[in-house]
Amino acid sequence: MLKTVGKLLAAGAVFALGVASVQAEDLKIAFFAASSQNGFNQAIYAGIEEKAAQIGGITTEIYDGQFNAAHQYSQIEDVLASGKFDGFVLAANDTVGIAGAVEQVGAAGKPLVTTLFPIGPDLTTLKRQVKGITSTVASPPADGAREQAGEVVEVCKDRNPCNVVIMIGQLIFPFDNLRYETFRSVLDKHDNIKVVATGEGSYSPDVSLTAMTDILQANSDVHVVLSNADQHLVGVEIALESAGYKVADVFLSGGGAANIAIDAIREGRWDATLAYFPKSMGRFALDVVVRSIKGQDVPEYINMDIVGPKPPIIDAAVLKADPNFVGEWEQ
């Protein structure tokens, strides 16, 4: 039984985690990670395991999607066919291409909760687009990108030109392309802001270091680096230092709220990070799967920008107000 309570969540209501959680008996839940080697995916799974232990009677297993969309699609089909699992949690590599596999899960009568991104052609909405999606636990990608870019506009208001580098994951990914287009839709409205280069960091400090090094060889005066991933800024910072920049003088905005970003903001080296809370995401997702199995009402979506422990943008002011805050993943 499904009940759309997403509007309540969007209005600020919190879906209770553990307060009224159902009890489970010998349930088996599979988590399809985009990559089991990725720190963010590992943190989602840690949240799943924590919630499973809290409820009791649940066995979980993680599957490695290897950052390979075709592999993950086949993986879901194979695991579904095995009949071993009662429910599924997904962190998709391809938010559009995976729809066929998700529909197969729905046709088999198994609940599936997607995390991090919605599944379907429209990444601007958390509403259900594909049959087989029980619920979506995510933040709307465009909303966060718009807030990040808005901060850059404010930082650049007294500088002309204000030279900006965008370091994105991979533009081939629909969610990264949406973030990039959202960045540009905000920044390009301001004549003083010049996007001098775009690099693809592939969520890797090493790849980002190489990309930023090349960018700095062609651009000698960079004022802002706007990124969707904290991992990128690790490499960006090294490249800036190697090029002779005082890192604290460059406005650095990342994404993920990883502990490495929280520490860098507290130290004054970085300026902001778009908040993600993967452990909380995993806990919400597991709870929804179990509720669905038990025939209880579940939300169509949970907007993590609303139910997360901090506002979407974490900066020095947020951390000053909560000196004990730590992120939910390392990097």
Image: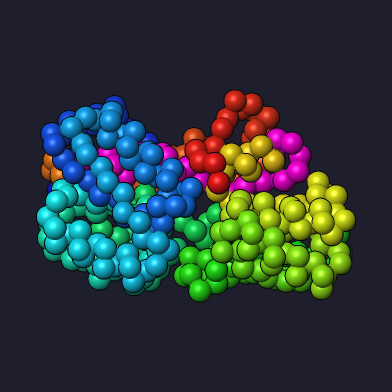
Q: Is residue 88 left or right of residue 120?
A: left
Is 285 covered by the magenta stretch?
yes
Compared with 29, 123 (above or below) is below
Is 256 or 190 nearer to us in this picture? Answer: 256
Is 160 covered by the magenta stretch?
no
Compared with 260, 127 (above or below) is below
Compared with 252, 175 (above or below) is below
Q: Position of residue 82 (x, y in %)?
A: 14, 58
Q: Position of residue 136 (x, y in %)?
A: 33, 53
Quadrant of the image occupied by residue 132: bottom left
Q: Is residue 229 left or right of residue 198?
A: left
Residue at point 87% right, 56% down? 244
Q: How many marks?
A: 0
Q: Position of residue 52 (x, y in %)?
A: 27, 35
Q: Is residue 296 visible?
A: no
Q: Position of residue 191 (x, y in %)?
A: 79, 70
Residue at point 53% right, 66% down? 176
- Indicate the colouring scheme: rainbow
Q: Is residue 101 left or right of residue 150?
A: left
Residue at point 74% right, 36% down? 267
Q: Start and end of the magenta stretch?
A: 265-291
Is 73 or 309 nearer to us in this picture? Answer: 73
Q: Is residue 267 visible?
A: yes
Is 223 or 160 nearer to us in this picture? Answer: 223
Residue at point 57% right, 30% down? 325
